[in-house]
Amino acid sequence: MKMITDWFRQQSGNPQVVFLALFLAGLFVVVILMGNMLAPLLAAVVIAYLLEGLVTVLEKSNLPRLIAVLVVYFAFLLFVVLILFGLLPLLSTQATQFVQQIPNMLNVGQEVLLKLPERYPEIVSAQQIDEIMVLIRTELTSWGQQLLSVSLASVMGLITVLIYLILMPILVFFLMKDKDSLVTWVSHFAPSEHQLVSEVWSEVDRQIGNYVRGKFWEILIVWFACVVTFSVLGLEYTMLLSVLVGLSVLIPFVGAAVVTIPVVFVAWFQWGFGSEFFTLLIAYLIIQGLDGNLLVPTLFSEVNNLHPVAIIAAVLIFGGLWGVLGVFFAIPLATLVHAVLNAWPRSAQDPT
């Protein structure tokens, strides 16, 4: 107990440590209590932060900052328009077709499963197969009811989307254009001894910036590779499955395993266990192998690799706190924790 008391006394005597603790606590409280209200602003801050890397590249080419901001901003708007009016309608159509095909897929799957008791009567019984199919149909019915409840609340969802479409582009533009003045204004509220916060922020900025931008390019490359591969092989729901595979890289370890299920299931339903099925499976595994062993080391060469145990722990903890968003941001949040832990002991030894 005395050791813990002495540690708190030592930390409280260091103004830099106290300010860092207050800053992190305040940030956590704002996100928890006001996250929903400030969601457009927080999302705009994240987008502006990501686009800042491109602005910096253009500034190094001797472009004035305002011109660089305008070029990047309009490129961002063009990208959003292409997603909204080009990709989303296609995904919606393929998702609807896929849902409509689920009953047929289940019937085919049931016929295959019913052959198992004939081949392996000592392991599987017809009653067990029936129970499995009832469980699957029950889960699908529950899933359909959830989709219905979401559709009933679509009016509020549409209002929210309109708010985001109007407010976020405006916020992103002004956050990018007036970045220096905003940073100067915020720094006026910081105490004179905030070197520890600056050190942590510098580390987090470098790591998270490289990580998020690398993930963006990884998603695009994996998505494009899957679109080409699935299209050449003639797989149904090509765009839907390719987008799912691309987005799966956001969830460490789990994402690749989960997204493999619909890819394999659709390929089996379309071709059975034929040569086309195994050709697609081999091509898909090659894409996953190149992603993990070539693409990731190339894109994230400047990022300090977290231990796999730390990544899994971050996914479990932040996923439990914030659901899907917590899983997506698990590694950036773990990077923040890692940077704080690295800076904290050094500052504690030097109270000045």
Image (cartoon, rainbow, N blue to C red):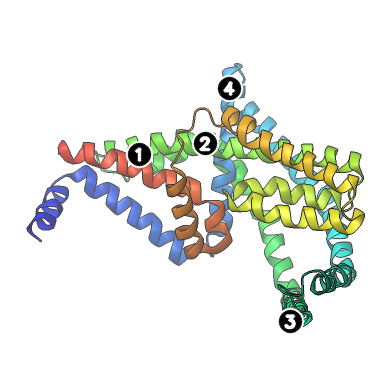
Q: Secondary structure at mark 2?
A: helix
Asked whether disc 2 touches disc 1, contact meaning CB atoms under 8 Å apart, the reply is no
As drawn, which residue projects farthest toward the left? Answer: 2
Q: CA distance from mark 4 to mark 1?
A: 25 Å
Q: Does residue 282 appear to the left or right of 33 in the view shown?
A: right
Asked whether disc 1 touches disc 3, contact meaning CB atoms under 8 Å apart, the reply is no
Q: Does residue 337 appear to the left or right of 135 in the view shown?
A: left
Q: Is residue 190 positioned above or below 32 on the image?
A: above
Mark 3 burial class by Cα count in 10 Å: few <14, some 14-19, many 20+: few
Give the label on residue 131, or none.
Answer: 3
User: Of residues 96 and 136, which is closer to you in this image?
Assistant: 136
The quarter of the rendered structure image containing the N terminus is bottom left
* Residue 265 point in image, percent of width and height: 80, 58
Q: Does residue 201 appear to the left or right of 148 in the view shown?
A: left
Q: Sequence-wise, which precedes: disc 4 or disc 1?
A: 4
Give the label on residue 18, or none.
Answer: none
Q: CA distance from mark 3 to mark 2?
A: 49 Å
Q: How many marks?
A: 4
Give the label on residue 209, or none.
Answer: 2
As shown in the figure, which amino acid type bears the numbered disc 1?
Val
Q: Which numbered disc, 2 or 4, marks the residue closer to the eye?
A: 2
Mark 4 burial class by Cα count in 10 Å: few <14, some 14-19, many 20+: some
**For mark 4, what is the residue?**
59
Asked whether disc 4 touches disc 1, contact meaning CB atoms under 8 Å apart, the reply is no
Q: CA distance from mark 4 to mark 3?
A: 64 Å
As shown in the figure, which amino acid type bears the numbered disc 2?
Gly
Asked whether disc 4 touches disc 3, contact meaning CB atoms under 8 Å apart, the reply is no
The reply to whether residue 112 is visible in this rendering is: yes
